[in-house]
Amino acid sequence: MSSFLFVVPPLVGHINPLVGVASALTSRGHRVAWAGEPALVRRLAGPDATVHPCGSGGPGGPEDSGQPVGPESAPAPEAVRSPDLRGPEALRFLWERFLVPLAEAMAPGVRRAVDALRPDVVVADQQALAGALVAEASGLPWATSATTSAEFADALASMPRVAAWNDRLLRDLRDRIGRPGGTGDPRFSPHLVLAFTTPELAGPAARGGDRIRWVGPSLAARPRLAAFPWHRLDPGRSLVLVTLGTANADAGRRFLVEAAHAVRARAGRVQAVVADPEGALGGGRTDDSDDVIAVPLLPQLDLLERAAAVVCHAGHNTVCEALWHGVPLVVAPIRDDQPVIAAQVADAGAGVRIRFGRATAPVIGKALDTVLDEPYVRAAAAKVSAAFRAAGGASAAADHLERLARQEDQV
C-alpha cells in the first residue's frame, strides 16, 4: 500500500478531475489524503475524505467547471478585477494576486500535511504551486495534475520579456517557500505530468515532453441538484447547454441574453438550458414555451448525456466533459487559458469559435446551426470522444501514480 497527498487550490474545476483518481487509488487499497480547503474538498470528494487544511490566501482564482462553488470556496478574482482585463495584464493579475499569494498561504499547511502523512507521492495541481515546491524541498517524488492543457502550449514563447518576468516570479517564490537554488518549473514535475486531455484535442505539447501521460478526462459522480426541472425538457428538440462557468457572471450577462435570443429564433427545433447564476435572463424565470430554461446551477454531466451542443466560454473542464460525450461546441473565450482551449476546439474541428465581445444573437445562432447541422463537426467531436475514452481517465492516472510510488515512472 502506498500513500498519496493531493494538493489542490480552492477551485471546483481543479478538484473534480482528481476526485475520480483518488477514488480509484482508494479502491486499490492505497491511502489518499488531501491538502486544501476542507469544506470544499469534502463536498466534492465525500464527507469522509481526509483533508489537511491549507490557507487559501488571496482572492481566489479562475473557475471553469460549471459546477456550484459554495461560500466555503475562495471568492473568484473576477470579484476584484475588471472583466475587461486581458493579455499580459490579466496574466500579471493571475500570478501576483492569486497564484503567488495562494502558494504562500498554502505552504505551511502543505508542510504539516507532508509531516503528518509522509506520503510516497505528492500530487500537485498546476495552480497549487506550494505542493510542488514543498515536495521538492522535502525530497519527495511528485506528480503534476494538469487540469488544463493551456500550459503545454507555451503561450509566452512569443513574449520573451513576459516569460522572463514569470521565471523571476517563480524563482523568488521558490526561495521563499521551497528549496532555494532549485531550477525546475513547479508547473511541470520532472517525474510525471498527468494531462486530463489527449493530443487529439490539445495537439502536440511544446512543454512537458516525455513526462506527460495523456489520460483524458477524469469524470466522477458529483452532488446531484435535486431542484432541476427535468420534466420540462422536450425530447423532440435538440438540447443546447449554455454555460460560462461559475466565475464569469459579471462579464457574461450580455452574452447570455444574446444566446437566449439565438435559441428562441430556433425554438421549433432547439431548446436551451442556461446556467444563469446572476439572473441575467430574469431571475430564473422562463417563457411559457420553455424554449429557454434558466437555472442558477447545472447538473452538467447528467445534461450532457442528452445534449446536442454546448455553448460556452472554452473552460477546459466544460470543453473536455462535452467532448467526452461527443457533444460539439460553440466556444467564446473570455480570458486566461480560454483562448488556447478555444483554438484547440477549432483546430480539432469539434466546434466553432466566436468572439465573446462581439457575439450577437445572429453570430451565436449561425455558429449553433453549424455545430448542430454539419456532419464534419459532429464527426470530429466523436473522434475526440473516442480518444478520450480510450485514454483511460481516472484509472489510467491511478496506474501512473502507482508506478511513480514504486519508482517505476520517473524520468
Image (cartoon, grey):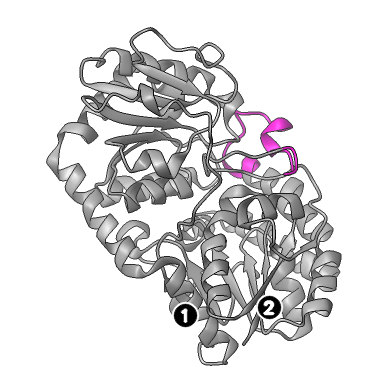
Q: Is residue 133 above or below residue 239?
A: below
Q: Residues in magenta?
A: 71-90
Q: Is residue 78 magenta?
A: yes
Judge left or right: residue 101 versus residue 377: right
Nearest to viewer (mark 1 / mark 2): 1
Gap in angstroms between the C-alphas marked 1 and 2: 28 Å
Q: Which residue is mark 1?
A: 399
Judge left or right: residue 275 versus residue 387: right
- For mark 2, give the secondary structure: loop
Q: Residue 9 location, x and y as percent?
A: 69, 55
Judge left or right: residue 124 versus residue 153: right
Tag 1–tag 2 contact (CB < 8 Å) = no
Residue at 43% over, 74% down: 396
Q: Residue 127 location, x and y as percent?
A: 65, 58
Residue at 20% over, 43% down: 377
Task: Residue 183: give its label.
Answer: 2
Q: Is residue 250 above or below residue 102?
A: above
Chief secondary structure of the magenta portion: loop
Compare residues 232 and 249 and report the one nearer the observer: 232
- Tag 1: residue type? Asp
